[in-house]
Amino acid sequence: MRLGLASTAVLATCLATSAFSADLPSRSAPPPPIVYAPVFTWAGFYVGLNAGVGWGGSRDVTVTGPTVGSSGVLSGGGGDGAFVGGGQIGYNWQSGAWVYGLETDIQYVGSNSNVSWGQYTWWADRGNDGGYFGTVRARVGYAIDRTLIYITGGLAYGGLNSSPLTGNTTSNTGWTVGGGVEYAFTNNWTVKLEGLYVDTGEGRRNRAFINPAGGVLPAGLYTATTNGGGNGGIVRVGVNYKF
């Protein structure tokens, strides 16, 4: 009888343990960890290329000739929708949604110019051979996730504006201001649209040349003088690779 009671107690204990174990959570493998995508940031170095169109401000060229009636003021001398292209390099810092940066660029300017004097057009559409300008600018922008809206300004050098008579004006310094919008279509690649106003403060330039015989104007030595007018604007698109 004692044996029977003991067996019954053991059996009851086993059944209770089995029922309790069934209520315990399964010891299966834990769920995989959640992997969060990295938050995009504008901070870091970047390099890129750009291309667009530029306009040089018009100005007058005063020509002094060897005889009475061979002197006058030639209007024009600005660039008419010139190709502008080059490269840029910069660095951004980001604090919350605000982005601060420094950028420098160098641009080739393929402008053509013409000047007219009364019924004459002198040296029309003479190319801006080797024209260039560059900038060193600060940028301040506001980021909306992968879209950056910014303003920019700083130092400009070189020149947008050449005269067919007095030649290129690419050894000047001045200022520039503008703005743009940039979009990051991957974590490393961005595309931007930017506009700049450039004023390189080009000063007085003189150039002497000889007008050959047989032309509309008398032959002889002429002097062309340009004053100022080293301003203009550009609109360009660019692509950057961010490290």
Image (cartoon, grey):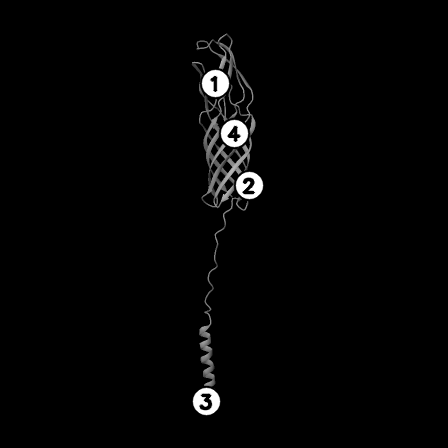
Q: Which residue is mark 1?
A: 75
Q: Amino acid at mark 3?
A: Gly
Dot 3 or dot 1, earlier in sequence: 3
Q: Which residue is mark 2?
A: 100
> Disc 3 and disc 2: Cα gap in Å?
87 Å
Which residue has dot 3 on it? 4
| Label 4 to label 1: alpha-carbon separation | 21 Å
Q: Residues within 10 Å of mark 4 (few under 14, many from 20)?
A: many
Question: Is residue 235 toward the left or the right of residue 206 in the image?
Answer: left
Look at discs 3 and 1 and give the one toward the viewer. 1
Q: Nearer the viewer, residue 206 or 175?
A: 175
Tell whether label 1 touches label 3 (CB within 8 Å). no
Q: Earlier in the sequence, mark 4 or mark 3?
A: 3
State the CA–CA distance, disc 4 to disc 2. 21 Å
Mark 4 or mark 1, which has the lower sequence index? Answer: 1
Name the residue rendered at 46%, 76% in the picture: 20
The residue under label 4 is: 198
Residue 215 spot, x, y in % from top left: 44, 10
**Where is residue 33 drawn, in percent x and y?**
48, 59
Mark with earlier residue (4, 2): 2
In the rendered image, the vertical position of residue 15 relative to residue 123, given as above or below:
below
Q: How many marks?
A: 4
Disc 1/disc 2 C-alpha distance (Å):
42 Å
The answer to whether the residues at label 3 and label 2 have Cβ atoms under 8 Å apart is no
**x, y (%) of residue 22?**
44, 74
- Mark 2 lies on a secondary structure that is strand
Inspect the image, locate mark 1, and give the three-letter code of the amino acid beneath it: Ser
**Picture layout, residue 215 above or below residue 162:** above
